[in-house]
Amino acid sequence: MLGVDFTSAPRPAKPITVAEGRLEAGRGARPIYRVDTVRELVSLEAFGTFLGEPGPWVAGFDLPFGQPRSLVVHEGWPESWPALVAFYCRQPRAQLRDCFRRWCANRPVGDKFAWRKADKPAGSSPAMRWTNPPVAWMMHAGIGRMLAAGLNFPAHAHPVHGRRIRPGVGKVRIALEAYPGFTARHICRLSYKSDTPSRQTAERATNRRRIVRGLIAGTAGLAVQLELSDHWRRRLVADGSGDLLDAVICGLQAAHAVLLPDYGLPHDLDPLEGWIASVPCPA
């Protein structure tokens, strides 16, 4: 079980962070996600090498896997998900930015962005957002490499039901979209991270400590609890960027999804947009 905190421009100061762990039977009724180690990938080339590692594994990736259908249809982009990925990742970012700006310029104040069905329930940024945070560029840098690596994407198969990919069978590698902020806010709704050293305050460290305790106690709305060594507990709290903690939460969300029928995906799932692991299906 892997959790991947992704960045579109990895470097030594801001790597792609990968938590590696195992889903095991717990001492109580709830399974545990046991963290073994955390890796740092300092380039997109290193990320590509990681994607080629043999399975079986299931990973939660913190980047959008798709764009809103309303935007795709409006722009005349491909409506088949693999074709959309290939098209989107071929486009220069400047061209995509112009497209996003045109969309926003023609929308009323308070409703500027297009949203996927999963974004608002998750509390995540819209997948088309190109700055603060630039999640559109995260998709641009990551999803094409993931598709080319031959990963399996349950939220983008058609149809999903009746074709469940079983974890642990053969060498299958399963990719689920994750968003750590959704789970973190179950425990603490205050800011817990910053990439700016001057904003990596004691208060944010206290908030990270609260989140880690909640994940261990199983109070984050997940079907699994976190288990990790004292070493990794200290590391998660000490990392002011929150990248280590976010990677671990991505792994927890993937572990939670594995325990649910069809990974907890909605019955009316739009395979063009996908879904975010651990976000409940709408009623």
Image (cartoon, grey):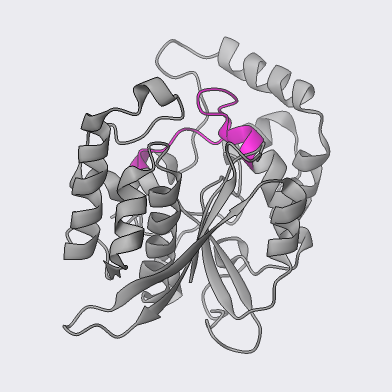
- Residue 130 belongs to the span the image colors magenta: yes
Q: What residue is at 79 percent from the left and 60 percent from the top?
A: 148
User: Which residue is the extreme one toward the bottom?
Assistant: 170
Q: Is residue 26 left or right of residue 34?
A: left
* Span highlighted in magenta in the image: 120-138
Vertical comparison of 248 with 124: above or below: below
Q: Position of residue 273 (x, y in %)?
A: 56, 48
Secondary structure of the magenta portion, mostly?
loop
On screen, residue 212 versus residue 37, left or right, reads left
Q: Residue at x 57, y 79 (%)?
A: 165
> Where does residue 163 sit, x and y in percent of width and height?
58, 79
Q: Nearer the viewer, residue 188 or 43?
A: 43
Q: Residue 19 location, x and y as percent?
A: 48, 61
Residue 143 visible in image: yes
Q: Quadrant of the C terminus?
A: bottom left
What residue lies at 43% left-to-right and 46% top-to-bottom?
118
User: In this image, 236 relative to 157: left or right?
Assistant: left
Q: Quadrant of residue 105?
A: top right
The x and y percentages for residue 255 are 40, 70
* 116 shown above or below 56: above
Q: Is residue 80 visible?
A: no
Q: Nearer the viewer, residue 222 or 39?
A: 39
Q: How many marks?
A: 0
- Relative to 151, residue 272 above or below: above
Who's the residue at 40% across and 58% down the image? 248
Asked if residue 102 lies in the magenta stretch, the reply is no
Image side of residue 2 versus residue 141, left or right = left
